[in-house]
Amino acid sequence: MRLLVIEDDPLLRHSLCEGLREELYAVDSAADGHEGLLKALATGYDGIVLDGMLPGLDGWELLRRLRHEKPTPVLMLTARDAVPDRIRGLDAGADDYLTKPFDFDELLARLRALIRRSSGRGSNLLEIEGVEIDTAARTVRREGEAIPLTPREYALVEYLALHRGSVVSRTELYDHLFDESDDTLSNLLDVHVSNIRKKLGPSFISTRRGHGYSIE
Amino acid sequence: MKPFFRSVRWRLLLWYALILLALITGLCLLAFRLASDDRTSQIDREIRSFQSTFFRSLFASQPLPDKNELPSLDEIRQRLRNPGDVSAFPPELHALFEDGGGGTFLACWDSDGSRLFISANAPDDLVPPRQAGDGSTQYVERDHRREHHRVNPSGMSSIIGRDISAEQSELRNFALLLALGGAAVWTAGLGGGWWLAGRALKPIDTIGRTASRIAAGNLDERIELARTDNELDQLGGVLNETFDRLAAAIERQKRFTADASHELRTPVTIILSETQRGLKREREPDQYREILANCRSAAERMRALVESLLVLARQDLPASGTDPVPCDLAEIAGGVADLLQPLADEHSIAIHRELSPAFLHGDPHSLAMVVQNLLSNAIVHPPSGSKVLLKTTVTGASVILEVRDNGPGIPSEHLPRLFDRFYRADTARGQASGHTGLGLAIAKTIVENHGGKIEVESATGTTFRVILPRG
């Protein structure tokens, strides 16, 4: 899952990005509205954390412009908790709203819910051929037994499971699993896939040569 | 009931009722008096004319030998004792000789008190009048009778009178009518007064209602003015102006509070987010150190903000700070420049001083804060290697402090709002550089509290100019 954090305060931006990375998200960041809009339009993020008060282009205006192009799920963060501000944010196209100061765990839960809803599911649990994926706890169980996965491997399984039945291209996987600072070698993806097959069974992920990967 | 009667409408009505009552009573009394006097003088006229008719008739039946001669006293006595042929008298005198008849009666006595003539219709209790014998008439009213008493210098006395009970009852009826009429007019007047008082007070009531709605929080409402420019309209206008000013002040206060809470929320968010992140799992000491350092920066930012807010709150109080004392702005500026020298060295900024003595009355501590805010801005914002000029001069009645840098300047769109609270021209640096966005607002408030003004010019380089009255 790849997220974009648009926040002008450097300390808070750093804290949010670090916290989200530790939760196995790939995180990009932007310090002002214009940069944020450019990145949001250029990359298919799974979710955007957007501050309301931004220099250059404020959060509401950014959201309005983004919504002309993309339906990316957006969680708005703002220090303004007046009802009209909240209404304005939601009407401009925000999917959820959180007032500063917020609880970091609540932010995580809301992001999970946002991503879950945007992929059209109602539950945090995915079950595929005896493999159970808990997207809240970030664990994978096979026939009741916990399977240890590295963060990258988990992210790969989760992304493919969320897009179950469709072929996900290598480019798309790169876009959603690695952030802008990652400089990963392209064959790393194959290494991850082969490790996952060792742990969850050879047929769990199928390869469509020239197209990408999929979970049937 | 007590508050009921305390209302202006009731008091007005009470006074109105009292005044109206006094006026109507006076008028009624006057009317009654006039009517009664008129009636009495008419009765007196009748009695007098009756008397002359009687005496004329007395001599008409047996005329005197000499018509031009006045009759002698004896002649009169004689005629009275023996009136002669009564039937020849005019009909209005006939009652005098009929028993029990009403009408005017007549009685005459001689000087020795013996009866000369007592008419048959005269009441029984008549006695000769006792008074000075100067021939003047005395008017006596008793037992529904009006009598003219008269004693001639010769000692002969007479009483002529008549029953006036009919007139008296007529007067009583008139009085009753007056009283009823007066009461009716008074009641109608009261009704009118109540209506008038209500009408006059209605705008006040409207003003009161509107004002209480405004007090209840509906700050956008205003008193409707009738545009007649009367006293109540003027009052309404004054109140509306007051409400405008109050609403603006409350709006400013609201915005300031919202901004302050907004500014405080970000550091709190950072502290919360960093501590929660840190406590989630075991970490390397370096990571803990980084988290703690972030928390400290956020806390320091909050401290600076809280201190600035306190300064502003104190400056906003009407009688803030200490009494003004004589001080030298050049000395204050020099002291601040010494304090900020390390910061200037850090940013490689050269502070050039042109300080000539500039005496004024003020609070040295607050003025130092002004210099510090302006000078630290001039040190932090321009690129390193820039020069800052700190200058004090005296012109006419003013003391002027100038802080000029030769940095890139401030874009002109920011200049009008530069002194607004929480306004930051340099958004990229934001809060992180430890700026609260309140420095220039504080400087402006302090300068204005000293009766001066602060200006900014920016083209190539920025000049802040503080103009204070000379002490």
Image: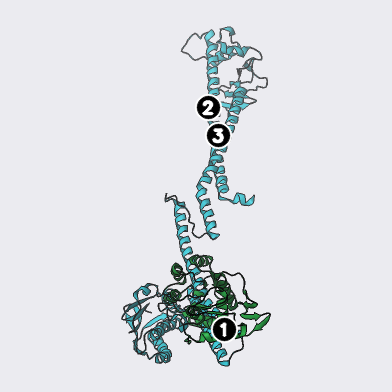
Chain colours: A green, B cyan
Query: What's under tag 3, amino acid-wise?
Result: Cys
Q: Nearer the viewer, mark 2 or mark 3?
A: 3
Q: Is residue B352 above or below residue B70?
A: below
Residue B231 spot, x, y in % from top left: 45, 52
Q: Nearer the viewer, mark 1 or mark 2?
A: 1
Picture disc at residue A153: 1
- The number of numbered badges drawn on the structure is 3
User: Which residue is denoted by mark 3 in the rendering?
Assistant: B28
Instruction: For the C terminus of chain B, give its image quadrant.
Output: bottom left
Q: Position of residue B247 (x, y in %)?
A: 48, 63
Of B408 and B439, nearer the camera is: B408
Mark 1 and mark 2: span between their CA atoms? Answer: 129 Å
Which tag is nearer the camera, tag 1 or tag 3?
1
Q: Is residue A192 left or right of residue B391?
A: right
Q: Say which chain tag 3 marks.
A: B
Q: Distance between the residues labelled 2 and 3?
A: 15 Å
What residue is shown with label 2? B38
Q: Give the letter of the chain under mark 2.
A: B
Q: Which of A56 and B234 is in front in this view?
A: A56
Same subunit, labels 1 and 3: the answer reads no
Chain containing the residue with disc 1? A
| Quarter of the view holding residue A192 | bottom right
Which disc is residue A199 wearing?
none
- x, y percent for residue B423: 43, 75
Q: From mark 1 to mark 3, how far is it between C-alphas?
A: 114 Å
Question: Tag 3 or tag 2, which sits nearer the N-term?
Answer: 3
Label 3 Cα crowd, 10 Å radius (few <14 / some 14-19 / many 20+): some
